[in-house]
């Protein structure tokens, strides 16, 4: 029986695209780089297009041919190679989680830092179970109650990156104050619990929360929300742009304008200290 075709996972795609970039920077054509390895051109093309993996030692030889000698960069790519076929916990929800969302969870699990600007909702990494269920139910037009519950479970499971041993994800979240005034008629305590969750999460050394006040001046975030996901070099940063129907990713140099935009959004928002005071005031107001 012939072997099943290899699935081009997110990790394998990022490894392939990074190798292609290094080959181009070395000034080598596909055929030249393949011959240096004793391969034919199609094999290297399949590797760069994430439909064929690399055996132990092959990645080291390729990087040497491309003049890549930085040990940290080599280690990052070797980790991608060895982890390329590993199944993530989210694959247990493959019937519920859309492919684009699964790709983002995979990226998030490998990231060093996420900078999120969320004008309408609390970021998923900081949501309570009740808030997640209520917002998913409110947004969706096609999901069953069972699917909504499963999606809320996925959102909660994603949060483990904030407390993973050794290298927890760094999260900087800027939330528009309007999102913190959301109310849920079926369960009035939901928003108060969510505000308390933001205050508690802010005590983690790797989590920073800012609030964009209702009376803010104009800033680049008026065009919509986005998440800037940053990785160890040499992997390019990725920006997620999301709407009701789809998710779009941009990476590498195309992510640079979003980095500049995020800095301006951060400068326009309340300071970290004033943000926590505002969240606490809103939470206290819901106790009355």
Image: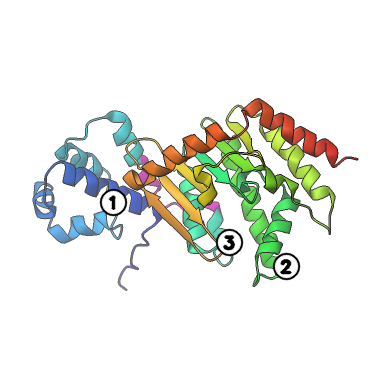
Q: Please state the horizontal and vertical placement of residue 87, each as a whole percent of the image.
A: 48, 54
Q: CA distance from mark 1 to mark 2?
A: 39 Å
User: At x 14% / y 54%, what residue is drawn?
Assistant: 30
The residue that label 1 is drawn on is: 16
Residue 61 is covered by the magenta coloring: no
Residue 83 is covered by the magenta coloring: yes
Q: Of the residues under marks 3 and 1, which one precedes in the sequence? A: 1
Q: Disc number at residue 145?
A: 2
Q: CA distance from mark 3 to mark 1?
A: 26 Å
User: At x 31% / y 34%, what residue is drawn?
Assistant: 73
Give the label, 3 or 2, closer to the camera.
2
Q: Please state the horizontal and vertical placement of residue 196, each as a whole percent of the image.
A: 76, 38
Q: Please state the horizontal and vertical placement of residue 268, each as a whole percent of the image.
A: 56, 34
Indicate the secondary structure of the residue bearing disc 3.
helix
Q: Please state the horizontal and vertical placement of residue 77, each as a whole percent of the image.
A: 32, 41
Indicate the secondary structure of the residue bearing disc 1.
helix
Q: Of the residues under marks 3 and 2, which one precedes in the sequence? A: 3
The residue that label 3 is drawn on is: 93
Foreground residue among 98 and 184: 184
Identify the image quadrant of the N terminus.
bottom left
Q: Which residues are magenta?
A: 79-89
Above or below residue 95? Residue 53 is: above
Q: Is residue 93 left or right of residue 254?
A: right
Q: Is residue 204 left or right of residue 42?
A: right
User: At x 18% / y 37%, what residue is drawn?
Assistant: 64
Foreground residue among 55 and 73: 73
């Amino acid at each position: 029986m012939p072997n099943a075709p290899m699935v081009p996972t997110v990790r394998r795609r990022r490894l392939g695209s990074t190798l292609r970039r290094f080959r181009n920077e070395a000034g080598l054509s596909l055929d030249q780089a393949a011959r240096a390895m004793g391969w034919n051109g199609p094999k290297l093309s399949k590797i760069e297009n994430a439909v064929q993996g690399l055996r132990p030692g092959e990645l080291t030889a390729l990087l040497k041919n491309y003049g890549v000698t930085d040990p940290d960069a080599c280690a990052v790519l070797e980790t991608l190679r060895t982890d390329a076929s590993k199944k993530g916990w989210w694959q247990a929800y493959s019937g519920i989680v859309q492919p684009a969302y699964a790709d983002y969870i995979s990226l998030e699990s490998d990231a060093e830092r996420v900078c999120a600007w969320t004008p309408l909702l609390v970021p998923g990494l900081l949501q309570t179970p009740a808030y997640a269920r209520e917002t998913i139910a409110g947004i969706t037009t096609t999901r069953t109650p069972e699917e909504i519950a499963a999606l809320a479970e996925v959102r909660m499971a994603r949060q483990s990156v904030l407390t993973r041993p050794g290298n927890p994800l760094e999260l900087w979240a800027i939330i528009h104050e309007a999102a913190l005034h959301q109310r849920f008629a079926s369960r009035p305590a939901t928003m108060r619990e969510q505000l308390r969750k933001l205050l508690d999460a802010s005590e983690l050394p790797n989590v920073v929360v800012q609030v964009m006040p209702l009376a803010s001046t104009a800033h680049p975030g008026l065009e919509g929300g986005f998440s800037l996901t940053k990785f160890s070099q040499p992997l390019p940063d990725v920006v997620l742009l999301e709407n009701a129907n789809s998710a779009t990713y941009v990476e590498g140099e195309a992510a640079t304008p979003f980095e500049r935009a995020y800095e301006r959004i951060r400068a326009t928002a309340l300071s970290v200290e004033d943000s926590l005071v505002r969240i606490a005031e809103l939470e206290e107001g819901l106790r009355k």
